[in-house]
Image: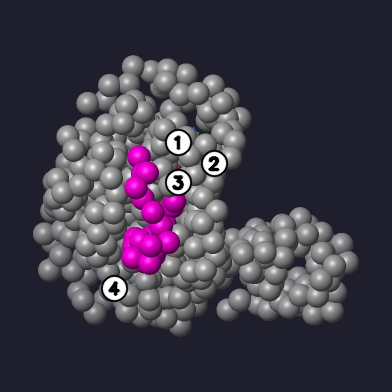
Amino acid sequence: MNTAASDQFSSLPISSAQLSNLASLGYARMTPIQASSLPHVLRSTDLIAQAKTGSGKTAAFGIGLLEHINPRFFGVQAMVLCPTRELADQVGKELRRLAQAISNIKLVSLCGGKPFGPQKGSLEHGAHIVVGTPGRILDHLNRKTLELAGLKTLVLDEADRMLDMGFSEAMKEIVAHTPRNRQTLLFSATYPEEIKKISRAIQRNPVTVTVEAEHAPGVIEQLFYQVKKHERNNTLLALFEHYQPESTLVFCHTKRQCDEVAAFLDENRIQSLAIHGDLEQRERDQVLVRFANNSCPVLVATDVAARGLDIKSLQMVVNYELPRDPEIYVHRIGRTGRAGEKGIALSIFSEAEQARVNAIENYLNTPCICDVPASLDRAPGFSLKAPMVTIQVDAGRKQKIRPGDLLGALTGDAGLAGSQIGKIDIFDMCSFVALDPAALRQALNYLANGKVKGRNVRARRVR
Ligand code: ADP
Ligand code: MG
Protein backbone atom coordinates (compact mmCIF):
# COMPACT_ATOMS: atom_id res chain seq x y z
CA MET A 1 0.00 0.00 0.00
CA ASN A 2 2.96 2.26 0.54
CA THR A 3 3.64 3.31 -3.03
CA ALA A 4 6.23 5.99 -2.36
CA ALA A 5 9.55 5.12 -3.90
CA SER A 6 11.47 7.79 -2.08
CA ASP A 7 11.30 9.81 1.07
CA GLN A 8 12.59 12.96 -0.62
CA PHE A 9 10.16 15.87 -0.84
CA SER A 10 11.68 16.61 -4.24
CA SER A 11 10.15 13.37 -5.57
CA LEU A 12 6.72 14.99 -5.19
CA PRO A 13 5.00 17.10 -7.83
CA ILE A 14 5.01 20.27 -5.73
CA SER A 15 6.11 23.83 -6.40
CA SER A 16 9.70 24.92 -5.91
CA ALA A 17 8.43 27.51 -3.43
CA GLN A 18 7.04 24.73 -1.25
CA LEU A 19 10.23 22.72 -1.63
CA SER A 20 12.49 25.52 -0.51
CA ASN A 21 10.15 26.37 2.35
CA LEU A 22 10.29 22.77 3.58
CA ALA A 23 14.06 22.96 3.49
CA SER A 24 13.97 26.21 5.45
CA LEU A 25 11.75 24.53 8.06
CA GLY A 26 14.43 21.89 8.42
CA TYR A 27 12.27 19.12 6.99
CA ALA A 28 15.01 17.10 5.33
CA ARG A 29 12.93 14.12 4.33
CA MET A 30 9.37 12.87 4.50
CA THR A 31 8.19 10.99 7.55
CA PRO A 32 6.74 7.54 6.69
CA ILE A 33 3.13 8.73 6.83
CA GLN A 34 3.98 11.68 4.59
CA ALA A 35 5.77 9.45 2.08
CA SER A 36 2.81 7.11 1.86
CA SER A 37 0.05 9.77 1.92
CA LEU A 38 1.29 12.70 -0.13
CA PRO A 39 1.33 11.06 -3.57
CA HIS A 40 -2.39 10.25 -3.11
CA VAL A 41 -3.24 13.59 -1.57
CA LEU A 42 -1.59 15.39 -4.48
CA ARG A 43 -3.52 13.24 -6.97
CA SER A 44 -6.77 14.38 -5.28
CA THR A 45 -7.62 10.84 -4.26
CA ASP A 46 -9.68 10.25 -1.12
CA LEU A 47 -7.57 8.81 1.66
CA ILE A 48 -7.75 7.13 5.03
CA ALA A 49 -4.45 7.53 6.82
CA GLN A 50 -3.58 5.98 10.13
CA ALA A 51 -0.49 6.84 12.12
CA LYS A 52 0.33 7.66 15.68
CA THR A 53 0.64 11.09 17.28
CA GLY A 54 3.77 12.97 16.33
CA SER A 55 4.25 11.19 13.02
CA GLY A 56 3.82 14.33 10.93
CA LYS A 57 0.21 13.94 9.83
CA THR A 58 -0.42 17.68 9.47
CA ALA A 59 2.14 18.07 6.70
CA ALA A 60 0.93 14.77 5.21
CA PHE A 61 -2.28 16.56 4.25
CA GLY A 62 -1.09 20.17 4.52
CA ILE A 63 1.51 20.06 1.75
CA GLY A 64 -1.06 18.51 -0.57
CA LEU A 65 -3.95 20.83 0.17
CA LEU A 66 -1.73 23.89 -0.21
CA GLU A 67 -0.67 22.73 -3.64
CA HIS A 68 -4.33 22.72 -4.72
CA ILE A 69 -5.15 26.22 -3.51
CA ASN A 70 -5.55 29.06 -5.95
CA PRO A 71 -4.55 32.20 -4.01
CA ARG A 72 -6.31 34.44 -6.52
CA PHE A 73 -9.69 32.89 -5.75
CA PHE A 74 -10.95 34.35 -2.48
CA GLY A 75 -13.09 31.54 -1.19
CA VAL A 76 -12.62 28.64 1.18
CA GLN A 77 -10.86 25.88 -0.74
CA ALA A 78 -9.63 23.68 2.10
CA MET A 79 -11.11 22.94 5.49
CA VAL A 80 -9.66 20.93 8.38
CA LEU A 81 -11.92 19.66 11.16
CA CYS A 82 -10.26 18.93 14.51
CA PRO A 83 -11.73 17.59 17.76
CA THR A 84 -10.50 20.33 20.13
CA ARG A 85 -9.35 23.90 20.01
CA GLU A 86 -5.82 22.95 21.08
CA LEU A 87 -5.52 20.56 18.18
CA ALA A 88 -7.00 23.09 15.78
CA ASP A 89 -4.47 25.64 17.03
CA GLN A 90 -1.60 23.21 16.46
CA VAL A 91 -2.80 22.39 12.96
CA GLY A 92 -3.30 26.08 12.19
CA LYS A 93 0.24 26.86 13.33
CA GLU A 94 1.77 24.07 11.27
CA LEU A 95 -0.26 25.00 8.17
CA ARG A 96 0.84 28.62 8.49
CA ARG A 97 4.45 27.49 8.60
CA LEU A 98 3.93 25.34 5.54
CA ALA A 99 2.10 28.13 3.72
CA GLN A 100 4.56 30.89 4.43
CA ALA A 101 6.30 30.45 1.08
CA ILE A 102 3.11 30.89 -0.89
CA SER A 103 2.10 34.53 -0.90
CA ASN A 104 -1.31 35.69 0.25
CA ILE A 105 -2.73 32.49 1.63
CA LYS A 106 -5.26 33.33 4.33
CA LEU A 107 -6.08 30.88 7.05
CA VAL A 108 -8.91 31.43 9.49
CA SER A 109 -9.43 29.41 12.61
CA LEU A 110 -13.00 28.76 13.74
CA CYS A 111 -13.23 27.29 17.21
CA GLY A 112 -15.68 27.50 20.04
CA GLY A 113 -14.80 29.45 23.16
CA LYS A 114 -13.95 32.45 21.01
CA PRO A 115 -16.26 35.33 20.04
CA PHE A 116 -18.23 34.81 16.87
CA GLY A 117 -18.01 38.35 15.47
CA PRO A 118 -14.28 38.51 14.68
CA GLN A 119 -14.47 35.08 13.02
CA LYS A 120 -17.31 36.32 10.84
CA GLY A 121 -15.24 39.40 9.99
CA SER A 122 -12.20 37.31 9.00
CA LEU A 123 -14.38 35.14 6.77
CA GLU A 124 -15.84 38.22 5.08
CA HIS A 125 -12.31 39.34 4.21
CA GLY A 126 -11.84 36.11 2.28
CA ALA A 127 -10.22 32.95 3.61
CA HIS A 128 -8.56 30.18 1.61
CA ILE A 129 -8.25 27.71 4.46
CA VAL A 130 -10.46 27.14 7.47
CA VAL A 131 -9.33 25.12 10.49
CA GLY A 132 -11.72 24.52 13.34
CA THR A 133 -13.92 22.40 15.54
CA PRO A 134 -17.14 20.86 14.17
CA GLY A 135 -19.54 22.68 16.51
CA ARG A 136 -18.40 26.17 15.64
CA ILE A 137 -18.01 25.44 11.94
CA LEU A 138 -21.56 24.14 11.84
CA ASP A 139 -22.67 27.32 13.60
CA HIS A 140 -21.11 29.41 10.86
CA LEU A 141 -22.69 27.28 8.16
CA ASN A 142 -26.12 27.58 9.75
CA ARG A 143 -25.75 31.33 10.07
CA LYS A 144 -24.50 31.48 6.50
CA THR A 145 -21.30 33.23 7.52
CA LEU A 146 -19.28 30.38 5.97
CA GLU A 147 -19.67 29.30 2.36
CA LEU A 148 -18.16 26.04 1.12
CA ALA A 149 -19.28 25.87 -2.51
CA GLY A 150 -15.66 26.25 -3.65
CA LEU A 151 -14.22 23.66 -1.28
CA LYS A 152 -11.69 21.31 -2.86
CA THR A 153 -10.23 19.50 0.13
CA LEU A 154 -11.93 18.43 3.34
CA VAL A 155 -9.73 16.98 6.08
CA LEU A 156 -10.99 15.18 9.15
CA ASP A 157 -8.03 15.25 11.49
CA GLU A 158 -8.04 12.93 14.53
CA ALA A 159 -11.28 11.53 13.15
CA ASP A 160 -11.46 8.79 15.77
CA ARG A 161 -11.46 11.39 18.56
CA MET A 162 -14.12 13.43 16.84
CA LEU A 163 -16.32 10.35 16.76
CA ASP A 164 -15.55 9.60 20.42
CA MET A 165 -16.59 13.12 21.28
CA GLY A 166 -19.95 12.67 19.60
CA PHE A 167 -19.26 14.81 16.54
CA SER A 168 -20.47 12.18 14.09
CA GLU A 169 -23.74 13.96 13.25
CA ALA A 170 -22.13 17.39 13.11
CA MET A 171 -19.50 16.02 10.72
CA LYS A 172 -22.13 14.61 8.40
CA GLU A 173 -24.08 17.85 8.48
CA ILE A 174 -20.95 19.79 7.61
CA VAL A 175 -20.18 17.43 4.75
CA ALA A 176 -23.68 18.08 3.37
CA HIS A 177 -22.64 21.73 2.87
CA THR A 178 -19.64 20.80 0.70
CA PRO A 179 -19.46 20.03 -3.02
CA ARG A 180 -19.74 16.40 -4.08
CA ASN A 181 -16.55 16.44 -6.10
CA ARG A 182 -14.42 17.41 -3.09
CA GLN A 183 -11.45 15.38 -1.94
CA THR A 184 -11.96 13.92 1.54
CA LEU A 185 -8.97 13.00 3.70
CA LEU A 186 -9.48 11.13 6.91
CA PHE A 187 -6.64 11.03 9.44
CA SER A 188 -6.87 8.93 12.52
CA ALA A 189 -4.61 7.43 15.16
CA THR A 190 -6.76 4.32 15.45
CA TYR A 191 -8.97 2.53 12.97
CA PRO A 192 -12.14 1.33 14.71
CA GLU A 193 -15.31 0.16 12.96
CA GLU A 194 -16.95 3.61 13.28
CA ILE A 195 -14.20 5.12 11.16
CA LYS A 196 -14.92 2.64 8.39
CA LYS A 197 -18.58 3.55 8.69
CA ILE A 198 -18.11 7.28 8.36
CA SER A 199 -15.65 6.72 5.54
CA ARG A 200 -18.30 4.80 3.62
CA ALA A 201 -20.71 7.66 4.20
CA ILE A 202 -18.51 10.50 3.01
CA GLN A 203 -15.60 9.19 0.92
CA ARG A 204 -15.27 7.88 -2.61
CA ASN A 205 -12.96 4.91 -3.27
CA PRO A 206 -10.53 5.90 -0.55
CA VAL A 207 -6.99 4.57 -0.51
CA THR A 208 -5.88 3.38 2.92
CA VAL A 209 -2.38 3.92 4.24
CA THR A 210 -1.16 2.74 7.61
CA VAL A 211 2.09 3.36 9.37
CA GLU A 212 2.64 1.08 12.29
CA ALA A 213 3.74 2.48 15.61
CA GLU A 214 7.50 2.31 15.45
CA HIS A 215 8.79 2.13 18.95
CA ALA A 216 12.16 0.54 19.29
CA PRO A 217 11.47 -2.47 21.51
CA GLY A 218 12.60 -2.03 25.09
CA VAL A 219 12.44 1.75 25.02
CA ILE A 220 9.24 1.69 27.01
CA GLU A 221 9.25 -0.46 30.08
CA GLN A 222 5.74 -1.80 30.60
CA LEU A 223 4.53 -3.27 33.86
CA PHE A 224 1.08 -4.31 35.04
CA TYR A 225 -0.14 -4.31 38.62
CA GLN A 226 -3.17 -6.33 39.57
CA VAL A 227 -4.93 -4.87 42.60
CA LYS A 228 -8.15 -5.10 44.54
CA LYS A 229 -10.49 -2.26 43.78
CA HIS A 230 -9.84 -0.42 47.04
CA GLU A 231 -6.05 -0.65 46.52
CA ARG A 232 -5.96 1.41 43.35
CA ASN A 233 -5.14 4.77 44.94
CA ASN A 234 -2.56 3.39 47.30
CA THR A 235 -0.85 1.54 44.45
CA LEU A 236 -0.77 4.71 42.40
CA LEU A 237 0.94 6.47 45.28
CA ALA A 238 3.42 3.60 45.62
CA LEU A 239 4.31 3.98 41.93
CA PHE A 240 5.20 7.62 42.47
CA GLU A 241 7.17 6.88 45.62
CA HIS A 242 9.10 4.13 43.88
CA TYR A 243 9.82 5.71 40.51
CA GLN A 244 9.91 9.38 41.59
CA PRO A 245 9.35 10.66 38.04
CA GLU A 246 9.74 14.29 37.06
CA SER A 247 6.82 14.24 34.63
CA THR A 248 3.86 11.91 34.56
CA LEU A 249 0.59 11.57 32.73
CA VAL A 250 -2.08 9.53 34.52
CA PHE A 251 -4.97 8.32 32.37
CA CYS A 252 -8.48 7.94 33.75
CA HIS A 253 -11.78 7.09 32.08
CA THR A 254 -14.07 9.73 33.43
CA LYS A 255 -13.91 13.40 34.25
CA ARG A 256 -14.95 12.76 37.80
CA GLN A 257 -12.24 10.15 38.24
CA CYS A 258 -9.65 12.66 36.97
CA ASP A 259 -10.70 15.18 39.59
CA GLU A 260 -10.74 12.58 42.36
CA VAL A 261 -7.37 11.09 41.49
CA ALA A 262 -5.70 14.50 41.17
CA ALA A 263 -7.16 15.54 44.53
CA PHE A 264 -5.97 12.30 46.12
CA LEU A 265 -2.43 12.74 44.81
CA ASP A 266 -2.37 16.35 45.93
CA GLU A 267 -3.45 15.38 49.42
CA ASN A 268 -0.56 12.96 49.45
CA ARG A 269 2.09 15.52 48.51
CA ILE A 270 2.18 14.68 44.81
CA GLN A 271 1.39 17.97 43.10
CA SER A 272 -1.10 17.29 40.29
CA LEU A 273 -3.70 18.85 38.06
CA ALA A 274 -6.66 17.30 36.29
CA ILE A 275 -7.65 18.07 32.73
CA HIS A 276 -10.85 17.03 31.01
CA GLY A 277 -13.61 18.33 28.84
CA ASP A 278 -15.56 19.98 31.66
CA LEU A 279 -12.96 22.66 32.19
CA GLU A 280 -13.49 26.02 30.60
CA GLN A 281 -11.11 26.85 27.80
CA ARG A 282 -9.32 29.35 30.00
CA GLU A 283 -8.72 26.70 32.67
CA ARG A 284 -7.58 24.15 30.11
CA ASP A 285 -5.04 26.60 28.73
CA GLN A 286 -3.70 27.23 32.22
CA VAL A 287 -3.38 23.55 33.02
CA LEU A 288 -1.62 22.73 29.75
CA VAL A 289 0.74 25.66 30.13
CA ARG A 290 1.66 24.70 33.69
CA PHE A 291 2.30 21.09 32.78
CA ALA A 292 4.46 22.02 29.79
CA ASN A 293 6.47 24.71 31.61
CA ASN A 294 7.47 22.55 34.60
CA SER A 295 5.05 24.12 37.09
CA CYS A 296 3.16 20.89 37.55
CA PRO A 297 4.75 17.44 37.52
CA VAL A 298 1.62 15.32 37.16
CA LEU A 299 -1.35 15.61 34.87
CA VAL A 300 -4.42 13.43 35.30
CA ALA A 301 -6.32 13.28 32.03
CA THR A 302 -8.97 11.58 29.97
CA ASP A 303 -7.90 10.26 26.56
CA VAL A 304 -9.65 13.06 24.77
CA ALA A 305 -8.11 15.83 26.89
CA ALA A 306 -4.64 14.33 26.51
CA ARG A 307 -4.86 14.60 22.75
CA GLY A 308 -4.21 18.30 22.85
CA LEU A 309 -0.96 17.91 24.67
CA ASP A 310 2.02 19.05 22.75
CA ILE A 311 4.68 17.85 25.13
CA LYS A 312 8.20 16.67 25.17
CA SER A 313 8.75 13.15 26.28
CA LEU A 314 7.22 12.12 29.57
CA GLN A 315 9.08 9.93 32.00
CA MET A 316 6.06 7.98 33.10
CA VAL A 317 2.59 7.13 31.90
CA VAL A 318 0.16 5.46 34.29
CA ASN A 319 -3.08 3.79 33.37
CA TYR A 320 -5.21 4.21 36.45
CA GLU A 321 -7.57 1.83 34.70
CA LEU A 322 -6.95 -0.07 31.49
CA PRO A 323 -8.75 0.99 28.33
CA ARG A 324 -10.99 -1.54 26.59
CA ASP A 325 -9.34 -0.98 23.25
CA PRO A 326 -5.68 -2.15 23.07
CA GLU A 327 -4.97 0.45 20.40
CA ILE A 328 -5.77 3.15 22.94
CA TYR A 329 -3.34 1.51 25.34
CA VAL A 330 -0.58 1.66 22.73
CA HIS A 331 -1.45 5.23 21.96
CA ARG A 332 -1.35 6.23 25.63
CA ILE A 333 1.99 4.66 26.39
CA GLY A 334 3.47 6.17 23.21
CA ARG A 335 3.51 9.43 25.16
CA THR A 336 6.59 8.21 26.99
CA GLY A 337 9.93 6.97 25.70
CA ARG A 338 10.10 9.47 22.85
CA ALA A 339 13.23 10.67 21.16
CA GLY A 340 15.33 7.75 22.26
CA GLU A 341 14.70 8.30 25.96
CA LYS A 342 13.60 5.50 28.20
CA GLY A 343 10.00 5.60 29.31
CA ILE A 344 7.98 3.78 31.94
CA ALA A 345 4.39 2.71 31.30
CA LEU A 346 2.57 1.33 34.33
CA SER A 347 -0.92 -0.05 34.40
CA ILE A 348 -3.13 -0.72 37.37
CA PHE A 349 -5.92 -3.20 36.81
CA SER A 350 -8.44 -5.15 38.81
CA GLU A 351 -9.49 -8.74 38.30
CA ALA A 352 -12.49 -7.56 36.34
CA GLU A 353 -10.16 -5.98 33.79
CA GLN A 354 -8.17 -9.17 33.11
CA ALA A 355 -9.78 -9.43 29.66
CA ARG A 356 -8.27 -6.07 28.77
CA VAL A 357 -4.81 -7.30 29.70
CA ASN A 358 -5.38 -10.32 27.47
CA ALA A 359 -6.50 -8.08 24.62
CA ILE A 360 -3.30 -6.04 24.97
CA GLU A 361 -1.21 -9.24 24.98
CA ASN A 362 -2.91 -10.38 21.80
CA TYR A 363 -2.54 -7.03 20.15
CA LEU A 364 1.15 -6.64 21.03
CA ASN A 365 1.78 -10.32 20.57
CA THR A 366 3.86 -10.44 23.73
CA PRO A 367 2.97 -11.37 27.28
CA CYS A 368 2.30 -8.50 29.67
CA ILE A 369 4.67 -8.55 32.63
CA CYS A 370 2.81 -8.40 35.92
CA ASP A 371 4.35 -7.18 39.13
CA VAL A 372 2.89 -6.93 42.61
CA PRO A 373 2.54 -3.61 44.43
CA ALA A 374 4.38 -5.10 47.42
CA SER A 375 7.59 -5.18 45.36
CA LEU A 376 7.65 -1.39 45.10
CA ASP A 377 10.17 0.35 47.36
CA ARG A 378 8.34 3.20 48.94
CA ALA A 379 10.15 6.30 50.13
CA PRO A 380 8.24 7.37 53.24
CA GLY A 381 7.23 11.03 53.22
CA PHE A 382 8.17 11.40 49.57
CA SER A 383 6.80 14.55 48.02
CA LEU A 384 6.76 15.65 44.40
CA LYS A 385 6.79 19.36 43.71
CA ALA A 386 7.31 21.19 40.45
CA PRO A 387 10.59 23.09 40.11
CA MET A 388 8.79 26.16 38.74
CA VAL A 389 5.73 28.30 39.46
CA THR A 390 3.63 30.12 36.87
CA ILE A 391 2.50 33.73 36.81
CA GLN A 392 -0.17 35.09 34.51
CA VAL A 393 0.21 38.60 33.10
CA ASP A 394 -2.88 40.30 31.68
CA ALA A 395 -1.31 41.33 28.39
CA GLY A 396 -0.81 39.18 25.34
CA ARG A 397 -0.62 39.03 21.58
CA LYS A 398 -3.40 41.61 21.15
CA GLN A 399 -1.29 44.03 23.17
CA LYS A 400 1.67 43.14 20.96
CA ILE A 401 3.53 41.49 23.81
CA ARG A 402 6.32 39.13 22.81
CA PRO A 403 8.32 36.73 24.98
CA GLY A 404 11.30 39.08 24.76
CA ASP A 405 9.29 41.93 26.29
CA LEU A 406 8.52 39.90 29.41
CA LEU A 407 12.00 38.46 29.61
CA GLY A 408 13.44 41.94 29.19
CA ALA A 409 11.25 43.49 31.91
CA LEU A 410 11.94 40.69 34.38
CA THR A 411 15.69 40.45 33.86
CA GLY A 412 16.12 44.19 33.39
CA ASP A 413 14.23 46.43 35.78
CA ALA A 414 12.90 43.63 37.98
CA GLY A 415 16.42 42.29 38.47
CA LEU A 416 15.77 38.57 38.04
CA ALA A 417 18.49 36.30 36.70
CA GLY A 418 17.81 34.79 33.30
CA SER A 419 18.20 31.35 34.83
CA GLN A 420 15.21 32.06 37.13
CA ILE A 421 12.88 32.42 34.16
CA GLY A 422 11.50 29.43 32.30
CA LYS A 423 9.10 28.99 29.43
CA ILE A 424 7.05 32.00 28.33
CA ASP A 425 3.69 31.43 26.61
CA ILE A 426 1.83 34.25 24.91
CA PHE A 427 -1.95 34.01 24.36
CA ASP A 428 -4.26 36.54 22.76
CA MET A 429 -5.18 38.42 25.92
CA CYS A 430 -2.66 37.18 28.48
CA SER A 431 0.75 35.60 28.93
CA PHE A 432 2.26 33.01 31.23
CA VAL A 433 5.78 33.00 32.60
CA ALA A 434 7.39 30.11 34.45
CA LEU A 435 9.57 31.27 37.33
CA ASP A 436 11.91 29.87 39.90
CA PRO A 437 9.78 30.00 43.11
CA ALA A 438 12.58 31.95 44.80
CA ALA A 439 12.02 34.77 42.31
CA LEU A 440 8.23 34.84 42.54
CA ARG A 441 7.82 37.64 45.05
CA GLN A 442 10.40 39.85 43.34
CA ALA A 443 8.70 39.38 39.97
CA LEU A 444 5.20 40.10 41.30
CA ASN A 445 6.41 43.14 43.25
CA TYR A 446 7.98 44.55 40.13
CA LEU A 447 4.99 43.87 37.93
CA ALA A 448 2.63 45.51 40.45
CA ASN A 449 4.41 48.83 39.90
CA GLY A 450 6.68 48.62 36.88
CA LYS A 451 5.80 48.37 33.22
CA VAL A 452 6.04 45.87 30.40
CA LYS A 453 6.57 47.40 27.00
CA GLY A 454 5.55 50.79 28.35
CA ARG A 455 2.25 49.67 29.80
CA ASN A 456 0.99 48.90 33.27
CA VAL A 457 0.05 45.27 33.66
CA ARG A 458 -1.51 43.10 36.30
CA ALA A 459 0.07 39.82 37.26
CA ARG A 460 -0.78 37.02 39.63
CA ARG A 461 0.38 33.56 40.45
CA VAL A 462 -1.65 30.81 38.80
CA ARG A 463 -2.83 28.23 41.32
P1 ADP B 1 0.76 14.41 14.17
O1 ADP B 1 -0.38 15.22 13.64
O2 ADP B 1 0.98 13.14 13.44
O3 ADP B 1 0.65 14.19 15.66
P2 ADP B 1 2.33 16.75 13.56
O4 ADP B 1 1.82 17.01 12.22
O5 ADP B 1 1.80 17.62 14.66
O6 ADP B 1 2.11 15.22 13.97
O7 ADP B 1 3.93 16.81 13.51
C1 ADP B 1 4.74 16.56 14.63
C2 ADP B 1 6.02 17.39 14.57
O8 ADP B 1 6.88 16.94 13.53
C3 ADP B 1 5.75 18.87 14.28
O9 ADP B 1 6.53 19.63 15.16
C4 ADP B 1 6.22 19.06 12.86
O10 ADP B 1 6.67 20.38 12.65
C5 ADP B 1 7.32 18.03 12.72
N1 ADP B 1 7.49 17.50 11.34
C6 ADP B 1 6.50 17.13 10.50
N2 ADP B 1 6.99 16.65 9.35
C7 ADP B 1 8.34 16.71 9.46
C8 ADP B 1 9.44 16.35 8.58
N3 ADP B 1 9.22 15.82 7.37
N4 ADP B 1 10.69 16.56 9.02
C9 ADP B 1 10.90 17.09 10.26
N5 ADP B 1 9.93 17.44 11.13
C10 ADP B 1 8.65 17.26 10.74
MG1 MG C 1 -2.14 16.00 14.32
Question: Which residue is the extreme one toward the right?
Answer: 413
Q: Please provide percent x and percent y for residue 147.
A: 39, 54
Looking at numbered disc 3 in the image, what kind of residue is underneath it?
Gly
Judged by depth in the image, the label closer to the viewer, 4 or 1, is 1
Is residue 181 or residue 300 the one in the foreground?
181
Residue sitting at x 45%, y 75%: 280
Residue topped by disc 2: 105
Residue 169 visible: yes
Horizontal side of residue 14 vs 220, given as left or right: right
Give the structural element (helix, strand or loop) at label 1.
Answer: loop
Q: Residues within 10 Å of mark 1 (few under 14, many from 20)?
A: many
Whichever of labels 2 and 4 marks the residue nearer the N terminus, that label is 2
Q: Is residue 322 above or below residue 130?
A: below
Looking at numbered disc 4 in the image, what kind of residue is underneath it?
Thr
**Pointers 2 and 4 in contact (C-beta within 8 Å):** no
Magenta-drawn segment: 129-152
Residue topped by disc 3: 75
Circle on res. 69: 1
Q: Please provide percent x and percent y for residue 388.
A: 64, 66
Q: Please provide percent x and percent y for residue 408.
A: 82, 59
> How far apart are the two marked residues, 3 and 1, measured between alpha carbons?
10 Å
Q: Is residue 130 above or below residue 264?
A: above
Looking at numbered disc 2 in the image, what kind of residue is underneath it?
Ile
Whichever of labels 3 and 1 marks the residue nearer the N terminus, that label is 1
Is the C terminus in the top left, top right, bottom left or bottom right quadrant? bottom right
Judged by depth in the image, the label closer to the viewer, 4 or 3, is 3
Whichever of labels 4 and 1 marks the residue nearer the N terminus, that label is 1
Residue topped by disc 4: 254
**Pointers 3 and 2 in contact (C-beta within 8 Å):** no
